[in-house]
Image (spheres, rainbow, N blue to C red):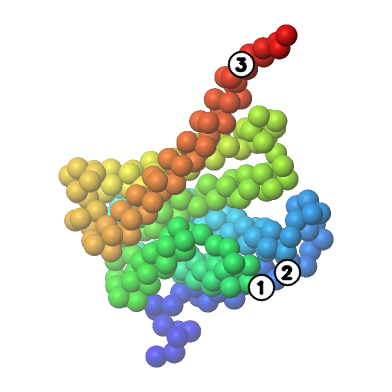
Amino acid sequence: MDIFTSPHVPPSLIAAVTLYPFLFIVLGKQQWVIDILPKKSDTQKYYHLCNKIVASVHSTIMTSTGLYLLLTVDWSKNDISTYKTPLTPFLVGLELGYLTQDTAFEFYQRARFGVGSNLILFHHVSVILGSVYYLYALTLDNPGPFFIGMLSLMNMSTPILHFRWVLQSRGCKFDESRLKRFVDTALMVTYFWCRIFGNWWMGVAIGAKLGMSWYQAPFYIGKKFTITTTTMFLMNVAWWLILAKQWFKSFKNFYFPKEIASKKID
C-alpha cells in the first residue's frame, strides 16, 4: 500500500516531519532570532530557542484548529465520540509529526550538547505511541473528535511557556519585571485550564452524554482514550504542581519579603 495514499497517514503527518525541520533550519539563519538572546549565549541556547519557536508555531496551529473543531460541530446533532470529521486525523497527524521530529531533535541535542530532559522525552514517546496506535490500529473508524479537539487545546499554554523561557534567558526575574510576573501568572492559570481542567472536562462531557460519572466515561468510550488521557493527565498535574510551587515561592518573596534585621556591632 502506498504510504502517501494510505488512510492511516494523514498529509499533515508528512507535512509536519518535513516543514517543521525546514522551519527550524530557516530560523537558525535569521538575525532577528539571534538578537532575541543575549550576545553571550552559546550555540546550544540558540538551538533551544529555534526549537521553542517551532513548538510555538505548532501549538498555535493545533490550538486554533482544535478550537475551530469544537466550536463548529453541532454536538446536539452529532455524537461527541463517533462523529467523523477530516480535522480529527489532521490534528492527530500534525501532533504525531511534530513530536516525531521533536523527539529526533531531543536525541540530537543530547548527542551534540550533552543535555536533555528525560521527562520531556518520556512525554513525547508516550504521546507518539498513543498517536500511532490511534492512526494505524484503529483505522480511523472511531475518531473521537471531541477528545482530539480538547487534547489539541492543551497546546494553548506552550507559547506562553516558551516566552517565559526567553524572559528568563534575558535575565528577567519575577521580583524585577512586571512582564515576568504577568507571564508567570498567565502560564500557571492557562496551564491549569487547558491541561488539567480541560482533561477533566472531557470526562464530564462524555459522562453527561452517556449518563454516567466523569471518571467512568473514558472506560466506556474506549481504551485508546483511557490510557493516553490518563497518562497525560497525571503528568500534567505533576508539572503544574512544580510550576505552582515555583510561582508561589516567587510571589511570596516579592510581596512578602523577609525582613532582615541588622545588628550593630559595637
Which residue is more in the foreground, 120 or 87?
A: 120
* Residue type marked 2: Val
Q: On screen, 161 above or below 143?
A: above
Can I make out residue 20 in this image? no
Name which quarter of the figure residue 88 lies in: bottom left
- Density class for disc 2 (Cα within 10 Å; few <14, some 14-19, many ≥20) is few
Element marked by disc 2: helix
Q: Is residue 38 left or right of residue 52?
A: right
Point 46% across, 42% down: residue: 242
Q: Is residue 174 left or right of residue 207?
A: right
**Position of residue 157 measured from the top left corner of the image (x, y, whole percent):** 53, 47
- Density class for disc 1 (Cα within 10 Å; few <14, some 14-19, many ≥20) is few
Mark 1 and mark 3: Cα distance apart in space: 53 Å
- Density class for disc 3 (Cα within 10 Å; few <14, some 14-19, many ≥20) is few
Residue 22 tag number: 1
Q: Is residue 33 left or right of residue 90?
A: right
- Contact between marks 1 and 2 (CB within 8 A): the answer is yes
Q: Which quadrant, please, contains the C terminus? A: top right
Mark 1 and mark 2: Cα distance apart in space: 6 Å
Residue tagged by mark 2?
A: 26
* Residue type marked 3: Glu
Which residue is more in the foreground, 41 or 123?
A: 41
Name which quarter of the figure residue 184 lies in: top right
Residue tagged by mark 3?
A: 259
- Contact between marks 2 and 3 (CB within 8 A): the answer is no
* Residue type marked 1: Phe
Can I make out residue 99 in this image? yes
Report the residue that reaches farthest toward the front: 266
Q: Count all numbered tags in the image, as a single digit.
A: 3
Element marked by disc 1: helix
Q: Which quadrant, please, contains the N terminus? A: bottom left
